[in-house]
Amino acid sequence: MKKLSANETAAIRKRFDKYDTDENETIGWDEFCLMIDELDSSIDLTKKTHIFDKVDKNHTGMVSFSEFLEWWQNRD
């Protein structure tokens, strides 16, 4: 993972905060689905589930900012 500048990290944090609608410092399943739908509305439920499971590295059912940051940098 490449080292991000403060501006790059701040921009990713802003995107994360946009989807953290309940402001609990994590993105839950519903928030994640909203984000994916805005990024690409053609992604089906099975693919969303696969992506969420990949992003939620510690399998808490919530995506932390560090998990989101890593995923955002490496998404394809």
Image (cartoon, grey):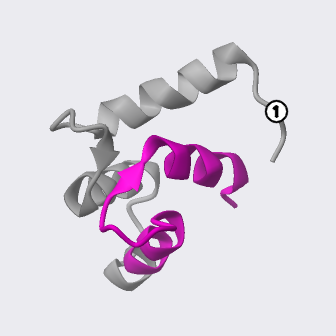
State the image quarter where residue 53 is shown.
bottom left
Q: Circle 1 sits on which residue?
A: 3
* Residue 63 highlighted magenta (yes or no): yes
Instruction: Look at 27% across and 39% down and name the residue there.
Output: 20
- On the rendered image, what quadrant is the C terminus found in? bottom right
Magenta region, main secondary structure: helix
Of residue 43 and residue 12, the one placed in the foreground of this image is 12
x then y, percent, for residue 30: 21, 59
Which residue shows up at 56% across the image and 22% down it?
Answer: 11
- Label 1 Cα neighbours within 10 Å, binned few <14 / some 14-19 / many ≥20: few
Residue 42 or 66: which is nearer the viewer?
66
Asked if 33 appears above or below 69 in the picture, the reply is below
Q: Amino acid at mark 1?
A: Lys
Examine the image and state in which quarter residue 60 appears: bottom left
Find residue 62 and report its horizontal and vertical position in percent. 32, 59
User: Would you place residue 5 above or below residue 75 in this image?
Assistant: above
Q: Quadrant of residue 45?
A: bottom left
Q: Residue at x 82, y 32 (%)?
A: 3
Residue at the spot x=66%, y=57% of the render? 75
- Magenta segment: 49-76
Residue at the left extreme of this rendering:
22
**Magenta residue check for 74:** yes
Q: Position of residue 15 (x, y in %)?
A: 44, 32
Q: Of residues 69 and 39, which is closer to you in this image? A: 69
